[in-house]
Amino acid sequence: WFSRWQRYVGDCAGMLSTDQQSSDRPGPIDNSDIISNGSNCDGNDLDIHRTLAEETDYVLVPQEVWERLLEW
């Protein structure tokens, strides 16, 4: 999803001309493919599959950014 979002907005969050941006909005965030079935004890946090690598398979963003992405 994050890669599709980057293509949609362009590099550096819109610094590229619009002809280099994708016209396809990426749709709702769906992290189901990177989340393992179990969650930790408190039930609020989900666990990422242990075989995935940060920056390759997923990107961590600050809470405020996450909330804004969900909002959009």
Image (cartoon, helix red, strand yellow):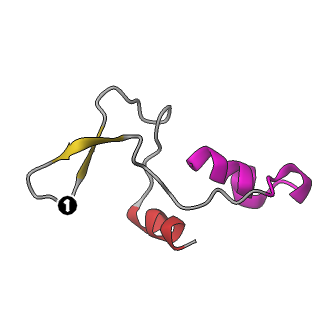
Using residue 56 as the reference point, say whether residue 11 is left or right of it. Answer: right
Residue drawn at the location 14% of the way across and 48% of the way down? 40
Q: Is residue 12 magenta?
A: yes
The kind of residue on which mark 1 rests is: Asn
Using residue 48 as the reference point, say whether residue 4 is left or right of it. Answer: right
Q: Position of residue 17 (x, y in %)?
A: 88, 56
Q: Is residue 24 magenta?
A: no
Check the image and name the residue furthest to the bottom.
71
Tell me the quarter of the picture where residue 14 sits. Answer: bottom right
Q: Position of residue 64 (x, y in %)?
A: 43, 68
Q: Position of residue 1 (x, y in %)?
A: 56, 49
Check the image and name the residue furthest to the top.
51
Please name whichever residue, 22 or 9, is drawn nearer the observer in this view of the structure: 22
The residue that mark 1 highlights is: 44
Q: Is residue 54 above or below residue 22?
A: above
Using residue 41 as the reference point, say whether residue 51 is left or right of it. Answer: right
Please report the bounds of the magenta region as a residue range.
Answer: 1-23
Using residue 60 as the reference point, say whether residue 9 is left or right of it. Answer: right
Check the image and name the residue furthest to the right.
19
